Image (spheres, rainbow, N blue to C red):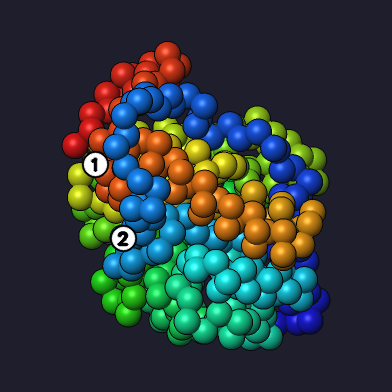
Amino acid sequence: MSKLTESAHAHRKDEHLAIALKQYQEKSDAGFDDIQIIHQSLPEIAVDNVDLSTHFAGLTLSTPFYIEAMTGGSERTGHINAKLAEIAAATGLAMAVGSQSIALKEPAAASTFTIVRKVNPHGQIFANIGAGHSLDDAQRLVDMVAADALELHINSAQELIMPEGDRDLRWRDHITEIINGLSVPVIVKEVGFGMSQETINTLKQMGVQYINVSGRGGTNFARIENERRYHQELDYLSNWGQTTVQSLLEAQAVSDMQIAASGGVRTPLDVLKALILGANAVGVAGHFLRVLMTHDEENLHTYIKDWQSDLRLLYALTGSRTTADLRTVKTVLSPALMNYYQQRNLKHQ
């Protein structure tokens, strides 16, 4: 592989980062405002008795939210990964790295991912690769960061809008091979376009146990990749897919599936609502990246600690001692969201 091609891959990573930061919106349209929590005036709980831990992908997470996959693959993004790993170690959060596929093509890029394990030797780390890769590729990348789990991302909309994206989206055999043969749990993850109950049922039939519905409302790869197109002619796909909240309702209709949610999570209240809607864990990417890049590591560290403290208050406010208790919290859907729920014939199982 030529040096020019290698620099082009790294440039794409930096370009994704720059466009994501430019397009960031303070107000999420992931659907969390369409969920109203019914207040109960007698929660009968002490904040000190709240337990924020949760179970997902065979792991026990001390906090129900984690640092979701963002970046890696270039010198700049490697530095960002190191900072995120330091914060993850200091706050006890799990952390997913960005797509490592570049490291399969360019061995020099591996250091931008291995730095995460070097900085955070005892933390919970998720490796990351696209669903079009082989079991051998997936295992190499898991070993690269001594990962506790793998995020296997499915990103058909992104690939088709990406100027240099894949045009062969036949991934089922790869997914089956990886989940059956990998040494760690596999989380099948969307990249911001959400999941339908049909997709989730298909994944379940394939043997998938863990998913991240990753809905529309946060980092928008349709807009990011369209901006990278010469004519930017696919802007009409900017709202493609289901929101994070719609995707969680879709996932509720499928039994025996552990769920993570990400996409447009901006506040601890968003985390709480995602957990109430059935998520076992909640990933936060763009919002934490924005705080880091506009301030510094110390600010993000403090910010995350505040979220952890605030979540304890929110659990108590709903009378929930544990994450599992949140499933009994009563909610009301907005008319628009209820209309979606009814048209999709979604029933909680």
Which sits in the foreground, 227 or 291?
291
Q: Give the residue furthest to the top.
A: 335
Tell me: residue 334, above or below residue 316.
above
Q: What residue is at 27 percent from the left and 44 percent from the top?
A: 325
Assess disc 2: are there few (<14), some (14-19) or many (≥20) residues with their C-alpha within 10 Å of its C-alpha. Answer: some
Q: How many marks?
A: 2
Residue 33 visible (yes or no): yes
Q: Of marks 1 and 2, which one's residue comes earlier in the chain?
A: 2
Q: Secondary structure at mark 2?
A: strand
Tell me: residue 121, above or below residue 67.
below
The reply to whether the C-beta atoms of the residues labelled 1 and 2 are less than 8 Å apart is no
Which quadrant: the N terminus?
A: bottom right
The amino acid type of the residue labelled 1 equals: Val
Which quadrant: the C terminus?
A: top left
Q: What residue is at 35 percent from the left and 25 percent from the top?
A: 41
**In 3D space, how far apart are the residues under numbered discs 1 and 2 (Cα atoms)?**
18 Å
Name the residue carrying label 1.
254
Residue 223 placement: quadrant: top right
Q: Foreground mark, 1 or 2?
A: 2
Q: Is residue 314 left or right of residue 206?
A: right
Q: What residue is at 31 percent from the left and 60 percent from the top?
A: 55
Q: Position of residue 96 (x, y in %)?
A: 52, 66
Q: What residue is at 55 percent from the left and 66 percent from the top?
A: 91
Name the residue carrying label 2.
55
Q: Is residue 136 left or right of residue 254?
A: right
Residue 119 placement: quadrant: bottom right
